[in-house]
Image: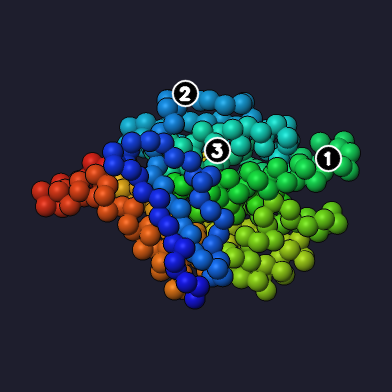
Amino acid sequence: MAALSGLRVLGYGGSGLAARAASWQSFPRPLTHRGHLRLAVQGFGQRGRQLSSEAKGEDELRVRYLEGEEQGIVVLGINRPQAKNAISKSLVKSMLKTVDSLKGSNKVRTVILRSDVPGVFCAGADLKERAKMHPSEVGPFVSKARALMNEFANLPMPTIVALDGVALGGGLEMALACDIIVAASSAKMGLVETKLAIIPGAGGTQRLPRAIGVPLAKELIFSARVLDGNEAKTLGLVSHVVEQNDAGDAAYKRAIALAREFTPQGPIALRMAKLAINQGIEVDLATGLAIEEACYAQVIPTKDRIEGLLAFKEKRPPRFKGE
């Protein structure tokens, strides 16, 4: 294993965890076992953005901040019915803007991505728009779409995607960028780019093998095969599969139920656990354990940890504040 002399954990400063905001973008790229290990772990705060229960953002992306028992859950609903939620320049721009606003907030506990269009999650790239692009424009657009998937994957809080309909090409790549995939049994999903003589370009060739293994990923991409929810569950592509209901939102309801399980837990702990898993899975075990140790060190000085101990002692539910 590489020497750990380069390990550096950035603390929160003398005034505590909530003293200042921090950007998730400051986290390093996946670590490797070569060279010195450097892990920058910073605190999480709010950038001064005020959250509300009202829908915000562009009409193509509806953003809802849930309240009551579901407070802390943010739902992103893709809404391009005329194009089966296909990924366009404007949708990428709206999603990047929204993700940027979410990642700096310590009020957001879980993000759920869903479709507001019945029967479809996302049909992939907007091919009508793509056909009008000059060849020189295609590469930069795909790079921006790939950046969007990376930004979504790097959100510090847990993310869940609800597939209540078709998720093809870029639509499945978007789902693969989330922590947990919930699908209706009737959902259809696949990386079908080879049918168009191209390859998945927004992370599919990398995230699918990590999800289901290299041989199966190659088989699905080479054949452009489309799976239903049950088949996807058998292969380990989705975490949960549910029978579709009359309203067509069974996967979304299951996602909400999962998010409600996450909400009571310590928000900083969830973020540190996600970071430790995401970074650690890319390296050897010894380096991964060092990453875990560094992440654990960040929860020790938090007020939430003390609150957890007091709540246990007093036999009451903890009241975590993300501090």
For mark 3, what is the residue? 99
Which comes before the other along the chain, label 3 or label 1? 3
Task: Name which residue type carries label 3.
Answer: Val
The residue sitting at 47% across, 63% down in the picture is 6
Residue 63: image tag: none
Element type at mark 1: helix
Q: Earlier in the sequence, mark 3 or mark 2?
A: 2
Q: CA distance from mark 3 to mark 2?
A: 17 Å
In front: label 1 or label 2 = 1
Give the residue displayed 62% in from the left and 47% down from the top.
149
Query: Percent position (x, y) of residue 259?
Result: 40, 46
Give the residue at mark 1.
Answer: 137
Amino acid identity at mark 1: Glu
Q: Nearer the viewer, residue 46 or 294?
A: 294
User: In the rendered image, which quarter contains the C terminus?
Assistant: top left
- Report the residue marked by disc 2: 54
